[in-house]
Image (tube, coloured by chain):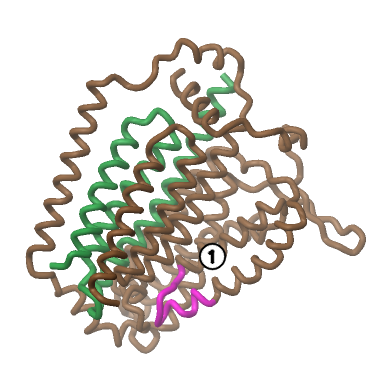
Chain colours: A brown, B green
Amino acid sequence: MSDTSLLVLDGLLVISLVTLAWTALAGSDARRSVILFMAFGLVLAAAWVRLLAPDVALAEAAIGAGLAGALLLAAVREQSRQPLPARIVSKRSHNKPGVNIALQWAVSVLCAVLAGTLAWALAHALNSAPQNALPRAVSANLEASGVSNPVTAVLLNFRAYDTLLELAVLLTAVLGIFALGPARPGYQSAGPVFDGLARWLVPVLILTAGYLLWVGAHAPGGAFQAGATLAAASVVLRLAGRHQIGLPQGPALRVVMAAGVGMFVLVGLGLLVAGRPFLGYPPPWAGGLILMIESAATLAIAATLVLAFLGGQPRPLAVRVARGRIAATPIPTGKPVSPEGIRSTEPHAAEACHRIQETQKRC
Amino acid sequence: MLTAQWLYGMSGCLIAALGLRTALLHACLLHRLIGINLTGAGVFMVLIAVAYRGAGMPPDPVPHALVLTGIVVAVSATALALALARRLTAEQIND
C-alpha cells in the first residue's frame, strides 16, 4: 500500500477510535455505552493489525471487546431487571443532578495535565533514537527460546515471571468473585435460530481455540487468545439456555482453575530440582515445556473467564437420564427464579443506570 | 519518527484522559468501569505506537507482550469490579 493510502487509513482509524471512545463515555444509557465500547475494541484491534501487532489484536478482539463486553452486557441486563423498593424510587424526585461544578473543573484539569504528561513522555520517546537493546536481545535469543513467535518467546520464556503472576491475578479475581455471591440465574432456552447457531458455532470455536494454542509457537496466537475463544464457546452455550456449558464440577473445577499457575510453578520447581534457575528452560526442552504450560494455562484462562461471566460459583448440577438423553439441571438452592421474572419485559437500560445511581446515593 | 506513531500515540493520550475523567466523575458505576477500561486502552495505544518501527521493519515484541498481559489483567479487574457492584446493589436493596 502506498504511503498516502496508509495515511488515509490511519486517519480514519484514529478518528473512529476517538469518536467511539467519546460517545461511549457520554450519555447515560448504559447498554448503548457498552455496545459502543465493544465497537471501540474491534476498531482498536484493526488499528493494532495496522501497527503490526497481530497477537495483541487477537487478544483485544477476543478479550477486550468480546468477553469484557459480554460481562458488561450481562451486568446491564441484570440491573435492568432488579426490583427496586418503593422507598428508594420515591427519593428520586429529591435528587440533585451531578457533582458540583468546581469539582468537575478540578478533575478535568487534572486529566488534561495527565494527558499532557503522557504526550510529553511519548514525544520524548519518539524524538530520541529508538531503543533497540531489548528487541535485539529478543531476536538474538529467539533460537534458544523454543518458539519462533517473538511475542510468545517474551511471554512464556524471557519474561515468564510476568505471565505466571498474570495467571495468579486471574485466579485471585475469580476467587474474589466466588467470595461475593452465587452465580447469576441462567437464561431461558433459546429459540431454534440461536440454538442452531450455537450448535454450529461451538465446535468451530473449540477447534479455533486448539488451533490458536498450537500456532502460537510460530505465528500470532497463544494461550490467552485460545483461552478466550474457548470461553466464548461456553458463553454461547450459556446464552442458549444450556445448563451444561463444559465447566467441570466440584474438585475438578478447582483443579482446572488453578491449572495455569500450578503447571507454571511445577515446571519451575522441577527445573530448580534439575539444577537450573526457576523457569530457566534448557533450550532443547523449551518448546515442549512452553506447550505444556500453555495448554494448562488455556484451560485455566477459559474456566476463569467463564466463571467471571457466570458471576459466581456455579450451582451443582443434577444429572438425570430421560428418554435416552442425559439432562442436567441446577439443584435449586434458596429462592427459585420464576420463569415469569425471566420473561418480563425489560425496562430501558437508562433506567438501570438510574437505579444504580439511586442505590449508590444512599450510602 | 513516523506519522503513524504520532497519530496513534497522541490519540491514545487523549482517550486515556477522557476515560479517566469519566471514571472519576460519572455517577453510574458501569460508565465508570468503561472509563477505566478506556484509560487502559489509551495507554496500550501509546505502548503499541512506541513499539512500531515502520512498514517492513519488525516491531519491538516486548511492549506487545506487556499489552497482552495488560488486556488480561484489565478484564479480570473488570469482572471483579462488576461482582463487587452486584453485591453492593444486593446489599442496598436488602437493607
* Position of the C terminus of chain B by quadrant: top right
Q: Is residue B32 above or below residue B59?
A: above
**A47 horizontally vs A319: left or right:** left
Over which residues does the magenta segment extend?
A211-223
- Asked whether the viewer can see residue A164, the reply is yes
Residue A214 vs residue A3, the one in the foreground = A3
Q: Is residue A352 above or below residue B18?
A: above
At x 29% / y 83%, what residue is drawn? A142
Q: Which residue is mark 1?
A: A229
**A145 horizontally vs B87: left or right:** left
Secondary structure under tag 1 reads helix
Figure quadrant of residue B33: top left
Q: Is residue A122 above or below residue A153?
A: above
Q: Position of residue A324 (x, y in %)?
A: 90, 64
Few, some or many residues within 10 Å of mark 1 (<14, 14–19, 20+): many
Q: Is residue A220 magenta?
A: yes
Q: Residue furthest right?
A: A323
At x 69% / y 62%, what residue is drawn? A197
Figure quadrant of residue A139: bottom left
